[in-house]
Amino acid sequence: QVQLVESGGGFVQAGGSLRLSCAASGRTFSSFAMGWFRQIPGKEREFVAAISWSGSTYYADSVKGRFTISRDNAKNAVYLHMNSLKPEDTDVYYCGAVYYSGTSYYFLKDRYQYNYWGQGTQVTVSS
């Protein structure tokens, strides 16, 4: 079992920055691939970024060049640095974990592959 807790969401003006954190507890964190997804009520959960156990990173086209995902295995944490935020980035952001040693982008962007989820953190970007 893995427990995930997101933090760092908030209210920011367009062009601003936020850093989301996801703290993990339970099984060996370094063996898990981690992903960030976002969702508003009534819509499907959308892939944002992922990082493999080995540190390879993957991004949705909509955030490429603006967001950076990173992990600190010593702290059992994964981060999402969000720069140049836009109003369309407004969403609830979720951290997910999957026990996976591969580096397939198509696997890691698929929300159905993730076994564990946090409760989400709200990000609101005003225009």
Image (spheres, rainbow, N blue to C red):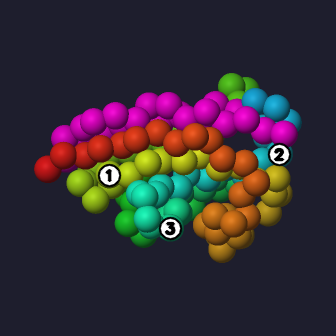
* Residue 19 seen: no
Q: In the rendered image, which quarter contains the N terminus?
A: top right
Among the 4 quarters of the image, the one containing residue 23: top right
Asked whether 92 falls inside the magenta stretch, the response is no
* Image position, residue 63 (x, y; %): 39, 60
* In-front residue for pair 81/116: 116
**Rendered view: 1 above or below 102:** above
Q: Residue at x 76, y 30 (%)?
A: 25
User: Please, which residue is most extreme toward the top here?
Assistant: 75
Which portion, as a residue range, is magenta?
1-24
Q: Quadrant of residue 31?
A: top right
Task: Where is residue 126? Give x, y as percent.
Answer: 18, 46
Q: Residues within 10 Å of mark 3 (few under 14, many from 20)?
A: few
Q: Please name the residue shown 41% across and 57% down the image.
A: 40
The mark total stands at: 3
Q: Which residue is mark 2?
A: 31
Question: Could you tell me how far apart the alpha carbons at marks 2 and 3 are, in whole angstroms?
Answer: 27 Å
Residue at the far left in the pictured view: 127
Q: Secondary structure at mark 3?
A: loop
In the picture, the disc for residue 90 is: 1
Q: Which mark is residue 44?
A: 3
Q: Is label 2 in a helix, a strand or a loop?
A: helix
Q: Secondary structure at mark 1?
A: loop
Mark 1 crowd level (few <14, some 14–19, many ≥20, 10 Å Cα): some
